[in-house]
Amino acid sequence: MHINNYNRSGAELLMGEARFTAPKTVEVSVPQGGTRRLAGEAVVINTGTRAQLPAIAGLAAAAPMTHVEALELDQLPGHLVVLGGGPVGLEFAQTYRRFGSKVTLVEKASRLLPSEDPDVSAEIEQLFKDEGIEIRLATTVRKVTGRSGAGVKLEAVSGAEVRVLEGTHLLVAVGRAPNTERLGLEAAGIATTPQGFVHVNERLETSVPNVFAVGDCANSPFFTHVSFDDFRIVRDNLVAAGAHHVKTDRLVPWCLFTDPELARIGLNETQAHERNIEYRLARLPMAGVLRTRALAETRGFMKVLVGKQDDRILGFTAVGSSVGEVLAPIQLAMSAALPYTSIRDLILTHPTITEGLVYLFAAVPSR
């Protein structure tokens, strides 16, 4: 599909590995052999990130899977051990458990999804326990032996307890590293952050004029939809004279595609407390959304934060069936600075998941 899109656009697609040799000039090593030199008026770097392997003794030698290899398996793991209780680890842990694998999830923090609110973490943790996934929290792995696919052993520490966790396969999902170290950025004078991401300003322009970076490698939020918006920023600034499209103050929605889903936009309670932002809170169990009764999927809840002294929507979080589809009307209202009552007073189709927003916003405490 993407190749066809390129062909229709008239753009040239050159497959190969590029390296800067000078500002706005790259040398591309092509798979067929040889190199090709390219120079342009503008350059956009969009090399993404890769799964990061933590510095654990024996881990690299164990050849663990990342999300890439986990999507290419042609056999069902007997016992999958997952390192990391973030989005990637959670999605794959539930997927393989439902395929029939025994799954153990190891997270060094004291709860899953540690950047989310405690009630969200608790909801997801209970879901996983109910599905038979073994969860090891506040646990650090200090040594790995064996090889993923043939059998692995992990020396795990939790408080004063040391135990060995065993599995047939190992999946690592503990963060991402930028694909920038082989680009020759220093030859072009392009600055990077201490973590190796390309340093960009609010226009996504690097330290070299008319050289841009977008997506993961520019340390934008790691979502495809954010990379698409990065493209729009660069496109507008290149095409329209005097344009100043920037990445600051973007409302970024995100979803965790477990079943049921987790969806959020704007502030959660943890962030509001950290920033000393006062708010009013409304909460609705998903069982109060009548569509979930029809689907027999009543697990989860919705909650919304509204300004204490005004009616602005500050943030929305939901765990439940198809809640990712509910984000758009809330995002639109937040982008347009509409009061929460603009959603509360809508006539929404019955029975839909979105209908639950009327009941949720009707529960916002009055000022």
Image: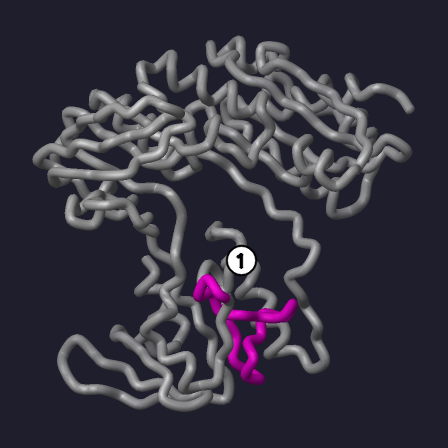
Q: Which residue was labeled with disc 1?
A: 220
Q: Position of residue 141 (x, y in %)?
A: 30, 35
Q: Position of residue 15 (x, y in %)?
A: 26, 73
Residue plotted at (12% across, 37% down): 149
Residue plotted at (22% across, 21% down): 102
Say whether residue 309 is left or right of residue 98. Answer: right
Q: Is residue 231 above or below residue 72?
A: below
Q: Is residue 152 above or below residue 356?
A: below
Q: Does the image show residue 248?
A: yes
Q: Secondary structure at mark 1?
A: loop
Numbered label tally: 1
Main SS, magenta region, reads: loop
Residue plotted at (22% across, 29% down): 80
Say which quadrant the C terminus sits in: top right
Say which quadrant the N terminus sits in: bottom left
* Residue 165, quarter of the rendered image: top left
Q: Is residue 258 magenta?
A: no
Work out whether residue 70 or residue 288 is closer to the camera in this orientation and state it: 70
Q: Position of residue 267 (x, y in %)?
A: 68, 38
Say whether residue 48 is left or right of residue 35. Answer: right
Work out whether residue 207 or residue 251 is closer to the camera in this orientation and state it: 207
Query: Label 1: few (<14), some or many (≥20) within 10 Å?
Result: some
Q: Amino acid at mark 1?
A: Ser
Residue plotted at (16% across, 44% down): 62
The stretch in magenta equals 194-213
